[in-house]
Image (cartoon, grey):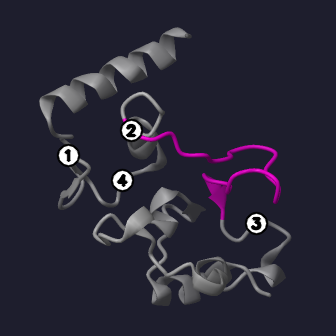
Amino acid sequence: MNMGRAVSVLAASVVFLAGSVQLCRGEEVFHHGLSVNPRGDFEDCVACHDGLIAKDVPYCTQNCSFKTAHSLQRPYPPPGQESSYQPPAVLRAEGVELVRGTVVCISCHNLRNPAPHHLVVDIDGSRLCYVCHIK
């Protein structure tokens, strides 16, 4: 394990053992035994969702395709592919959030939604996918 990853795991373990995550941005919600920022960044989510503290979640940050997990920390819409994606205003109307113009965990997940996977939009009929992707 590299030193950066070891420090990340140690920091996340301390947070887990303390019983809460102390973040200074916005109102916190109860999430799987911890008090977390529901508008947290990608790093906030994967600090725990790494397979050691909480369920490991698949994601892709480089060389992403339909065969990999969904891409994160990527600009929306992807440069040069604007015609294949809905305008950001459509996303906002559906409750999908972009952080600094990028797709992050909270783009698809709303921690205030108690349903499994905390999805922003129901996945039935790939509805969540088509909030962003044009058929």
Q: Residue at x 21, y 60 (%)?
A: 26
Question: Which residue was labeled with disc 1?
Answer: 33
Name the element at disc 2. loop
Residue 30 image point, x, y percent: 19, 55
Whichever of callouts 1 and 4 sits on the residue coming sooner in the sequence is 1
Whichever of callouts 3 and 1 sits on the residue coming sooner in the sequence is 1
Label ID, residue 54: 2
Name the element at disc 3. loop
Q: Disc 2 and disc 3: Cα gap in Å?
A: 30 Å
Disc nearest the viewer among 1 and 4:
1
Amino acid type, residue under disc 2 in the picture: Ala
Whichever of callouts 2 and 4 sits on the residue coming sooner in the sequence is 4
Foreground of the two, 15 or 40: 15
Disc nearest the viewer among 2 and 4:
2
Amino acid type, residue under disc 3 in the picture: Pro
Residue 23 image point, x, y percent: 22, 45
Q: Disc 3 and disc 1: Cα gap in Å?
A: 36 Å
Question: Which residue was labeled with disc 4?
Answer: 40
Q: Bounds of the magenta span?
A: 54-75
Q: Are marks 2 and 4 in contact (CB under 8 Å)?
A: no
Residue 59 within the magenta-colored segment of the rendering: yes
Question: Which residue was labeled with disc 3?
Answer: 78
